[in-house]
Image (cartoon, rainbow, N blue to C red):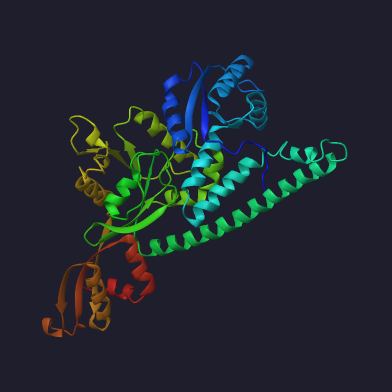
Amino acid sequence: MQFFERHEGGERAVLLHVVSRQQSRAEDLDEFRELVDSAGAEILGECLASREAPDPRLYIGKGKAEELADLVKNTEADLVVVNAQLSPSQERNLEAVLQCRVLDRTGLILDIFSQRARSHEGKLQVELAQLKHLSTRLVRGWTHLERQRGGSIGLRGPGETQLEMDRRLIHDRIKQLQERIAKVRRQRQEGRKTRQKSEVPLVSLVGYTNAGKSTLFNALTEAGTFAANQLFATLDTTLRRLEFAPGEPMVLADTVGFIRHLPHELVTAFRSTLEETLEADLLIHVVDAASPERDRQMTDVEVVLKEIGADTLPRLTVMNKIDQLEDRAPEISHNEAGEIDRVWMSAQSGLGMDLLRQALGERLRPTRTTINLFLPASLGGLRARWLNEGAIVAEKWQDDEMHDEFVQPGWQLTLSLTQARWAQWRKHHPELEACLAAPA
């Protein structure tokens, strides 16, 4: 089903970039070019416009629109990509003037996501975002019905009915997708419950797109996740279990990269995926240390983290790609509280990888509590399990031969466990309460 009568090409593009006093010309333009290139379009020309406020009808002025139309005609482009979010009416009005397809920034990013989504969940989320975006742009979608027999008399009613039918079909599909994504979300929640019971910490990689998250993920896990020097190379969240230190496991999540002005439809659609970020015990914010825009990119990531409610989670910043910087050696820096908060390294070359593992060990190793108890011989099975966990710090056997009066034989133990783990032992073995009260 085709909603719009537009040219089928769409690979030869002219770019429209609007700047103002608050926004420098080069701030967004390079990234905009990368986005268009990532979508697979051939850039034939660029048009720069300067406006303090968008025109409500065409977004740009009439004169600039005519200049852009000439550029489209001379380059024989079949697509104009605008580095801004257009209203449906602005998009339609520009198409009428330019006589070609017009795609705004949101539509461009949605197109890239539709190309890159590989998992079932990722495809569902992208389709949901696309349909929500499309639902606002159905006006004038069925003009071909009025032209089937050379006129519009007698055909206005069916055209209008068809448009309403399309809206209803999209609404029904959106509802169906939301139900499927909710089912996947419930499955994720069950997986999280299992991890939480086993006390395996969850670490989530976040950062600006193309900062090197997937490369770092592969370096830590040897997972072979696709990584490339392009925007949104990886969309689907990948989870892998690994040990950040001998005998100390963790689950690492590689999530979708963030970008400036990330479309709200995508933030909403990918909320179930981003919950891996919300549930994380630690966020690793991966930063492209070699990028001239790194400070702005870090700020943009903070904006998205705040939008999804993850801005208060514990954070470890990884300044990646130091191999592209001069005279920058791997190092660890601490905050005012003496806690490791930043690691300078290179995931590609492996520089500083040992420092990252050291930082993970310090940040993830939970606070342990010391428990002294007397374990009678009848409960020797618990001692064996504690030995397997490495929880016994010290032990001493005692029986009636060691005392003048009879003492029940057993072990005087000193345990080292996390408070959560000790609470689990007490919950499943109420007899431990008497062991705590037993005299040494």
Comparing 335 with 399, the one in front is: 335
Residue at far right of view: 154
Comparing 202 with 23, the one in front is: 23
Residue found at x 48% / y 43% = 309
**Looking at the picture, how far across and down is residue 440, in whole percent?**
20, 72
Residue found at x 58% / y 19% = 70
Vertical side of 436 occupied by 355: above or below? above
Residue 432, visible in the rendered structure: yes
Comparing 58 with 42, the one in front is: 42
Comparing 147 with 119, the one in front is: 147
Residue found at x 49% / y 41% = 112
Residue found at x 66% / y 42% = 135
Apparent side of residue 41 relative to residue 328 in the rendered image (left or right):
right
Q: How many numbered marks appear?
A: 0
**Looking at the picture, how far across and down is residue 193, in whole percent?**
44, 62
**Looking at the picture, how far across and down is residue 123, in whole percent?**
52, 52
Residue 315, visible in the rendered structure: no
**Looking at the picture, how far across and down is residue 405, in whole percent?**
16, 84
Apparent side of residue 390 relative to residue 17 in the rendered image (left or right):
left
Among the 4 quarters of the image, the one containing residue 315: top left
